[in-house]
Image (cartoon, helix red, strand yellow):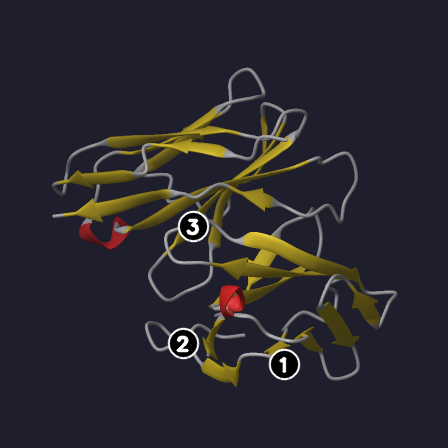
Amino acid sequence: GESVGLHLPTLSVQEGDNSIINCAYSNSASDYFIWYKQESGKGPQFIIDIRSNMDKRQGQRVTVLLNKTVKHLSLQIAATQPGDSAVYFCAEKAAGNKLTFGGGTRVLVKP
Amino acid sequence: EAGVAQSPRYKIIEKRQSVAFWCNPISGHATLYWYQQILGQGPKLLIQFQNNGVVDDSQLPKDRFSAERLKGVDSTLKIQPAKLEDSAVYLCASSLGRTDNQPQHFGDGTRLSIL
């Protein structure tokens, strides 16, 4: 994901609906991927991770899907709640546990 | 489990001054990272330590930035002299580091403003 500076892509979702956040990664050698949630004034918070030998992983209300063929990662949030409003980043790792972050997507939950 | 601790939370300085940030990682985490996050962007890695040794500092502007982790626990990041473009949030993260593919856990960062 390329940085979009101050103008983050924004996903507006109704409370209770499902959210899908997409991320295109760049390095076909990446073997580990993480989704982070970042609220205003706070550091990124780990949500869920997935290794490249998997194509799906589920957590509590979240599911990450990995499509290595097209280098695409998605995060699905079930029954989106107001507390889910934040900026979401995907990150990819190639060698040495060095993460490269995408540009982020802002999620706004409407009551 | 206590998270990654950083201080100060905010710092305002004038350009050409110096500044230092402090990080205490999660207990037992061997790997420590410093990131720079410019407003509206994802974090960018500056330096990675494994215990007290530097693993990767390829994106650290070494003419003005320095970092150390002398005893393999706490770390400091210093900028001297600061430039306007250094205005950003400086995040510290840590991971267990015993194997690859460990999630990194972040502190809440230090927000630096350069006047």
Amino acid beneath label 1: Ile
Residues at discs 3 and 1 both on one chain: yes
Picture coordinates of residue A21, whole percent (x, y): 60, 78
On residue A42, the disc is 3
Residue B66: quadrant of the picture: top left
On residue B114, the disc is none
Picture coordinates of residue B2, whole percent (x, y): 58, 30
Sequence-wise, the earlier of marks 1 and 2 is: 2
Mark 2 crowd level (few <14, some 14–19, many ≥20, 10 Å Cα): some
Q: Residue at x 67, y 69 (%)?
A: A27
Say which element carries label 3. loop
State which chain disc 1 sits on: A
State which chain disc 3 sits on: A
Amino acid beneath label 3: Lys
Up the image or down, A106 lies above or below B115; here it is: below
Residue pointed to by mark 2: A8
Residue pointed to by mark 1: A20
Sequence-wise, the earlier of marks 3 and 1 is: 1
Residue A47: quadrant of the picture: bottom right
